[in-house]
Image (tube, grey):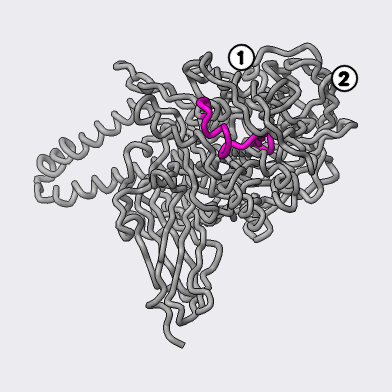
Amino acid sequence: MPDAHGQVRIEAVHVGFVDKYTGVSYGRFGHWLPVRVVVASGGVAEFQGYVTVSMPDADGIVHEAKAEELIQLSPAKPRQAVWAYVPCGHGKLRVQVRDAQERTVASLTHPDDLGQTHLWHLIRPAISHILALGDPAGLHENAAAQESGPDPGYRVCHLDTPQYLPERWFGYDSVQAIVLATGGSAGEPWLQALRDRPALAQALRQWVQQGGHLVVSVAERANWLAQAGRFPLADMLPGDWPLGRQVYPELLVGIREVTATRHREPTALPTLRTDWAEFRKKPTATQRAFAADPLKPAVLVWPYGLGQVTLLTWDTNVGPFTRWSGRKEFWEWLLETEPLPARQAFRTTLTMQREPEPLTQLIHPLEQFQTEEIPFSHAAGFMFLYLLLAGPVDYLITVRWLRRPAWAWLTFPLMVMAVTLAAWLSAWAIHGDQLAVHELVVYDLELEASSRGATRVVRGSASAWLVLKSPQLAAYSLGIGSSASDATATISSQPAKSFPASVREAVLGWAVRPDDDALQRGQRESLVQGAVRIAPGQGRLTHLPMQAWSVKTLFARWLLHWDVPPTLAEARLRAPDLNTIRGELVWHGAWPLLGSELTFGIRVWPLGDLQPGHKVQVQRNDVALLDRQRLQSAQISRVEAEVVTPATAVDPNKKGFDSLTLVETLRRLTFQRLFMANRRQAAQPYLPYLDQSKRLRQGQAVLSGYLPVEEMPLNQLSHRPSLSSTLGFLEPALPGKLRRLVFVRLYIPLAEQD
């Protein structure tokens, strides 16, 4: 058989999402970047191998990811496309094809070997990224607005064909919204791709569950979308369509009213008349805009996981909407985008610093470890003593007393070695010889209430920040879940019964802050040899190099799945109006929920510590959401004496991250849009899933709280109680401790007052 190694070549590389109108490829720094690689051969031999994609991070350390699908070429199959995912950085992308013996048979550097002169376009943290499928009208006009006026605050990428859509949810990590226009010949290929590619439909479903916003516009093909066999995402739509019903022309008066709030000349904006599909609003959906009258919905929305699904009951890529003068302003209203200010935050000449970004305020306390601070006076005294020993004392001893000046060639190096050794031993005593890990975990659980009030978990996801402080120079390997292939967590709803939750689609990589200097300074040179191997989808990371006493912050996200969904609470709650809750809540978790608060509308009900079996009557003891910050000091004094289980008790006198500061920061991020000082400020799209303000206007309540802070030896990671199952393994097995804070957010749908 002829050798295929010389004939295998990399035919094409598609990085990120390429806009078909401008040819610009988009990515977001620190987020997962999808890479589509096409490998081809001459068609005369068989070849089996795999593809690797590598890119340096902000510190110049190369991260290498392996495509999950293997390359299998033959004369009958001379070409194959595979997907790989790497964290987006500043450097160039290197793609390699290796055979079964780990030999490199083809390589390519993007963009040099492709004849291109530019990398992908890095989207700034304050800008939203939108994918347009099926050519919805009005979205592509933001590019012209950016050139002639203020930055619109969003970037739109119109994809050419469905083959450039990744089949894993984290391939859309940099995307905030996907607009799917189903009308005409432009919309049909995308519907066929969702029908014929189950992995693609599953990826979009999981992406919405992780915080994405899916917008579907439909009228012409309403019968298609109503059938689950033809449209796999039919159950996610917030409206029902009876088969056989016909669309008819209608004046969309409500669409004109909401668009007029963004239009420059509201009085000159005409009313849109187009074919309209009369969808029926599902019980828990919300109507954002109506058609001809308030009983005819035009824009329906409801939450799904951490994201939301919006249904537009007319086609946006065909018909009168493509010629309507308010189409651009309508999308800006729907997607809630805001133009960026002409000048960024002002730095005073005295402070020369901006106000800390909320996400930075969340990560910074985690990076504070238990180390004794040496006063500056002591350090200055030791330096002065060193200068005395190396200068006058050495001179007096060797020249004046011993009268052997030549001995200075020996005494001075010995003195430098002694001082260096003393400094090393002092630093070792200060920093310790144990590996320290801080972990902040956020669990998001969506509940579904039955008529009897028993609320079970229907969807769950989690995210975690891991901060490692290494006592020595080492290369670490760690992962989410278990070190074995069975990665499971445990959520207990009763003391005698537990429900295993599978950890699925986990990703683990380096954490980036929106105000990180790496976004502006570019890539650094690194002396580290070898690559850090990452496994997106498996939540594993190997060969992570760390220097002695250095700190590294990682970020992980994953989905939770239960074979038997647990029942965490009985929520017999009703909402007489948009800011009032009445009823009772019974907590059934096997673990206490400390500092719990129930938020609905613009009101907050402090519930205190919920112990297992605790029943709470929700009455008129609420406070305004914007005024709750005045209670923070009182809560801090109360929670400093928090009660934790003896097995995981933490000494309150120990130094480390402040759990109360982290909890308050997470609550501000949860309702970030409601805490804005004015309308010109927009919520940070860098991690949009953290902001769940939309639930408060969609008829849902948010129950938040945290578990007792845990501290455990690293060799007991496999003995994880209750909900706090996250870090599964950490190698090498050095002695050390893990300090963990778990913050829980539960989303409860409410019934309206009869």
Q: What is the secondary structure assignment of the residue under circle 1?
A: helix
Counting from the top left corner in percent of width and height, residue 144 is at 39, 32
Q: Residue at x 44, y 32 (%)?
A: 142
Disc 1 versus disc 2: nearer the observer: 2
- Identity, as a three-letter code, of the amino acid under mark 1: Leu
Which span is picked out in magenta? 303-327
Q: Residue at x 85, y 26 (%)?
A: 572
Question: Closer to the camera, 11 or 331?
Answer: 331
In this rendering, the answer to whether 326 lies above or below 404 is above
Quarter of the C terminus within the rendering: top right
Name the residue at the right extreme.
Answer: 452
Q: Is residue 46 left or right of residue 309?
A: left
Marks 1/2: CA distance? 29 Å
User: Which residue does the image show at 37% across and 23% down from the upper left?
Assistant: 344
Q: x%, y% of residue 712?
A: 63, 43
Q: Quadrant of residue 724?
A: top right
Task: Evaluate whether residue 667 shows in this view.
Answer: no
Label 2, on which residue?
754
Q: Which residue is disc 1 drawn over?
A: 626
- 194 inside magenta stretch: no
Q: Amino acid at mark 2?
A: Asp
In the structure shown, which secondary structural element does the residue marked by tag 2 occupy? loop
Nearer to the camera, 742 or 539: 539
At 65% from the left and 51% from the top, the residue drawn is 202
Residue 398 position in % (x across, y down) = 13, 44
> For residue 422, what is the image quadrant?
top left
Q: Examine the rendering and report whether any part of residue 394 can be seen.
A: yes
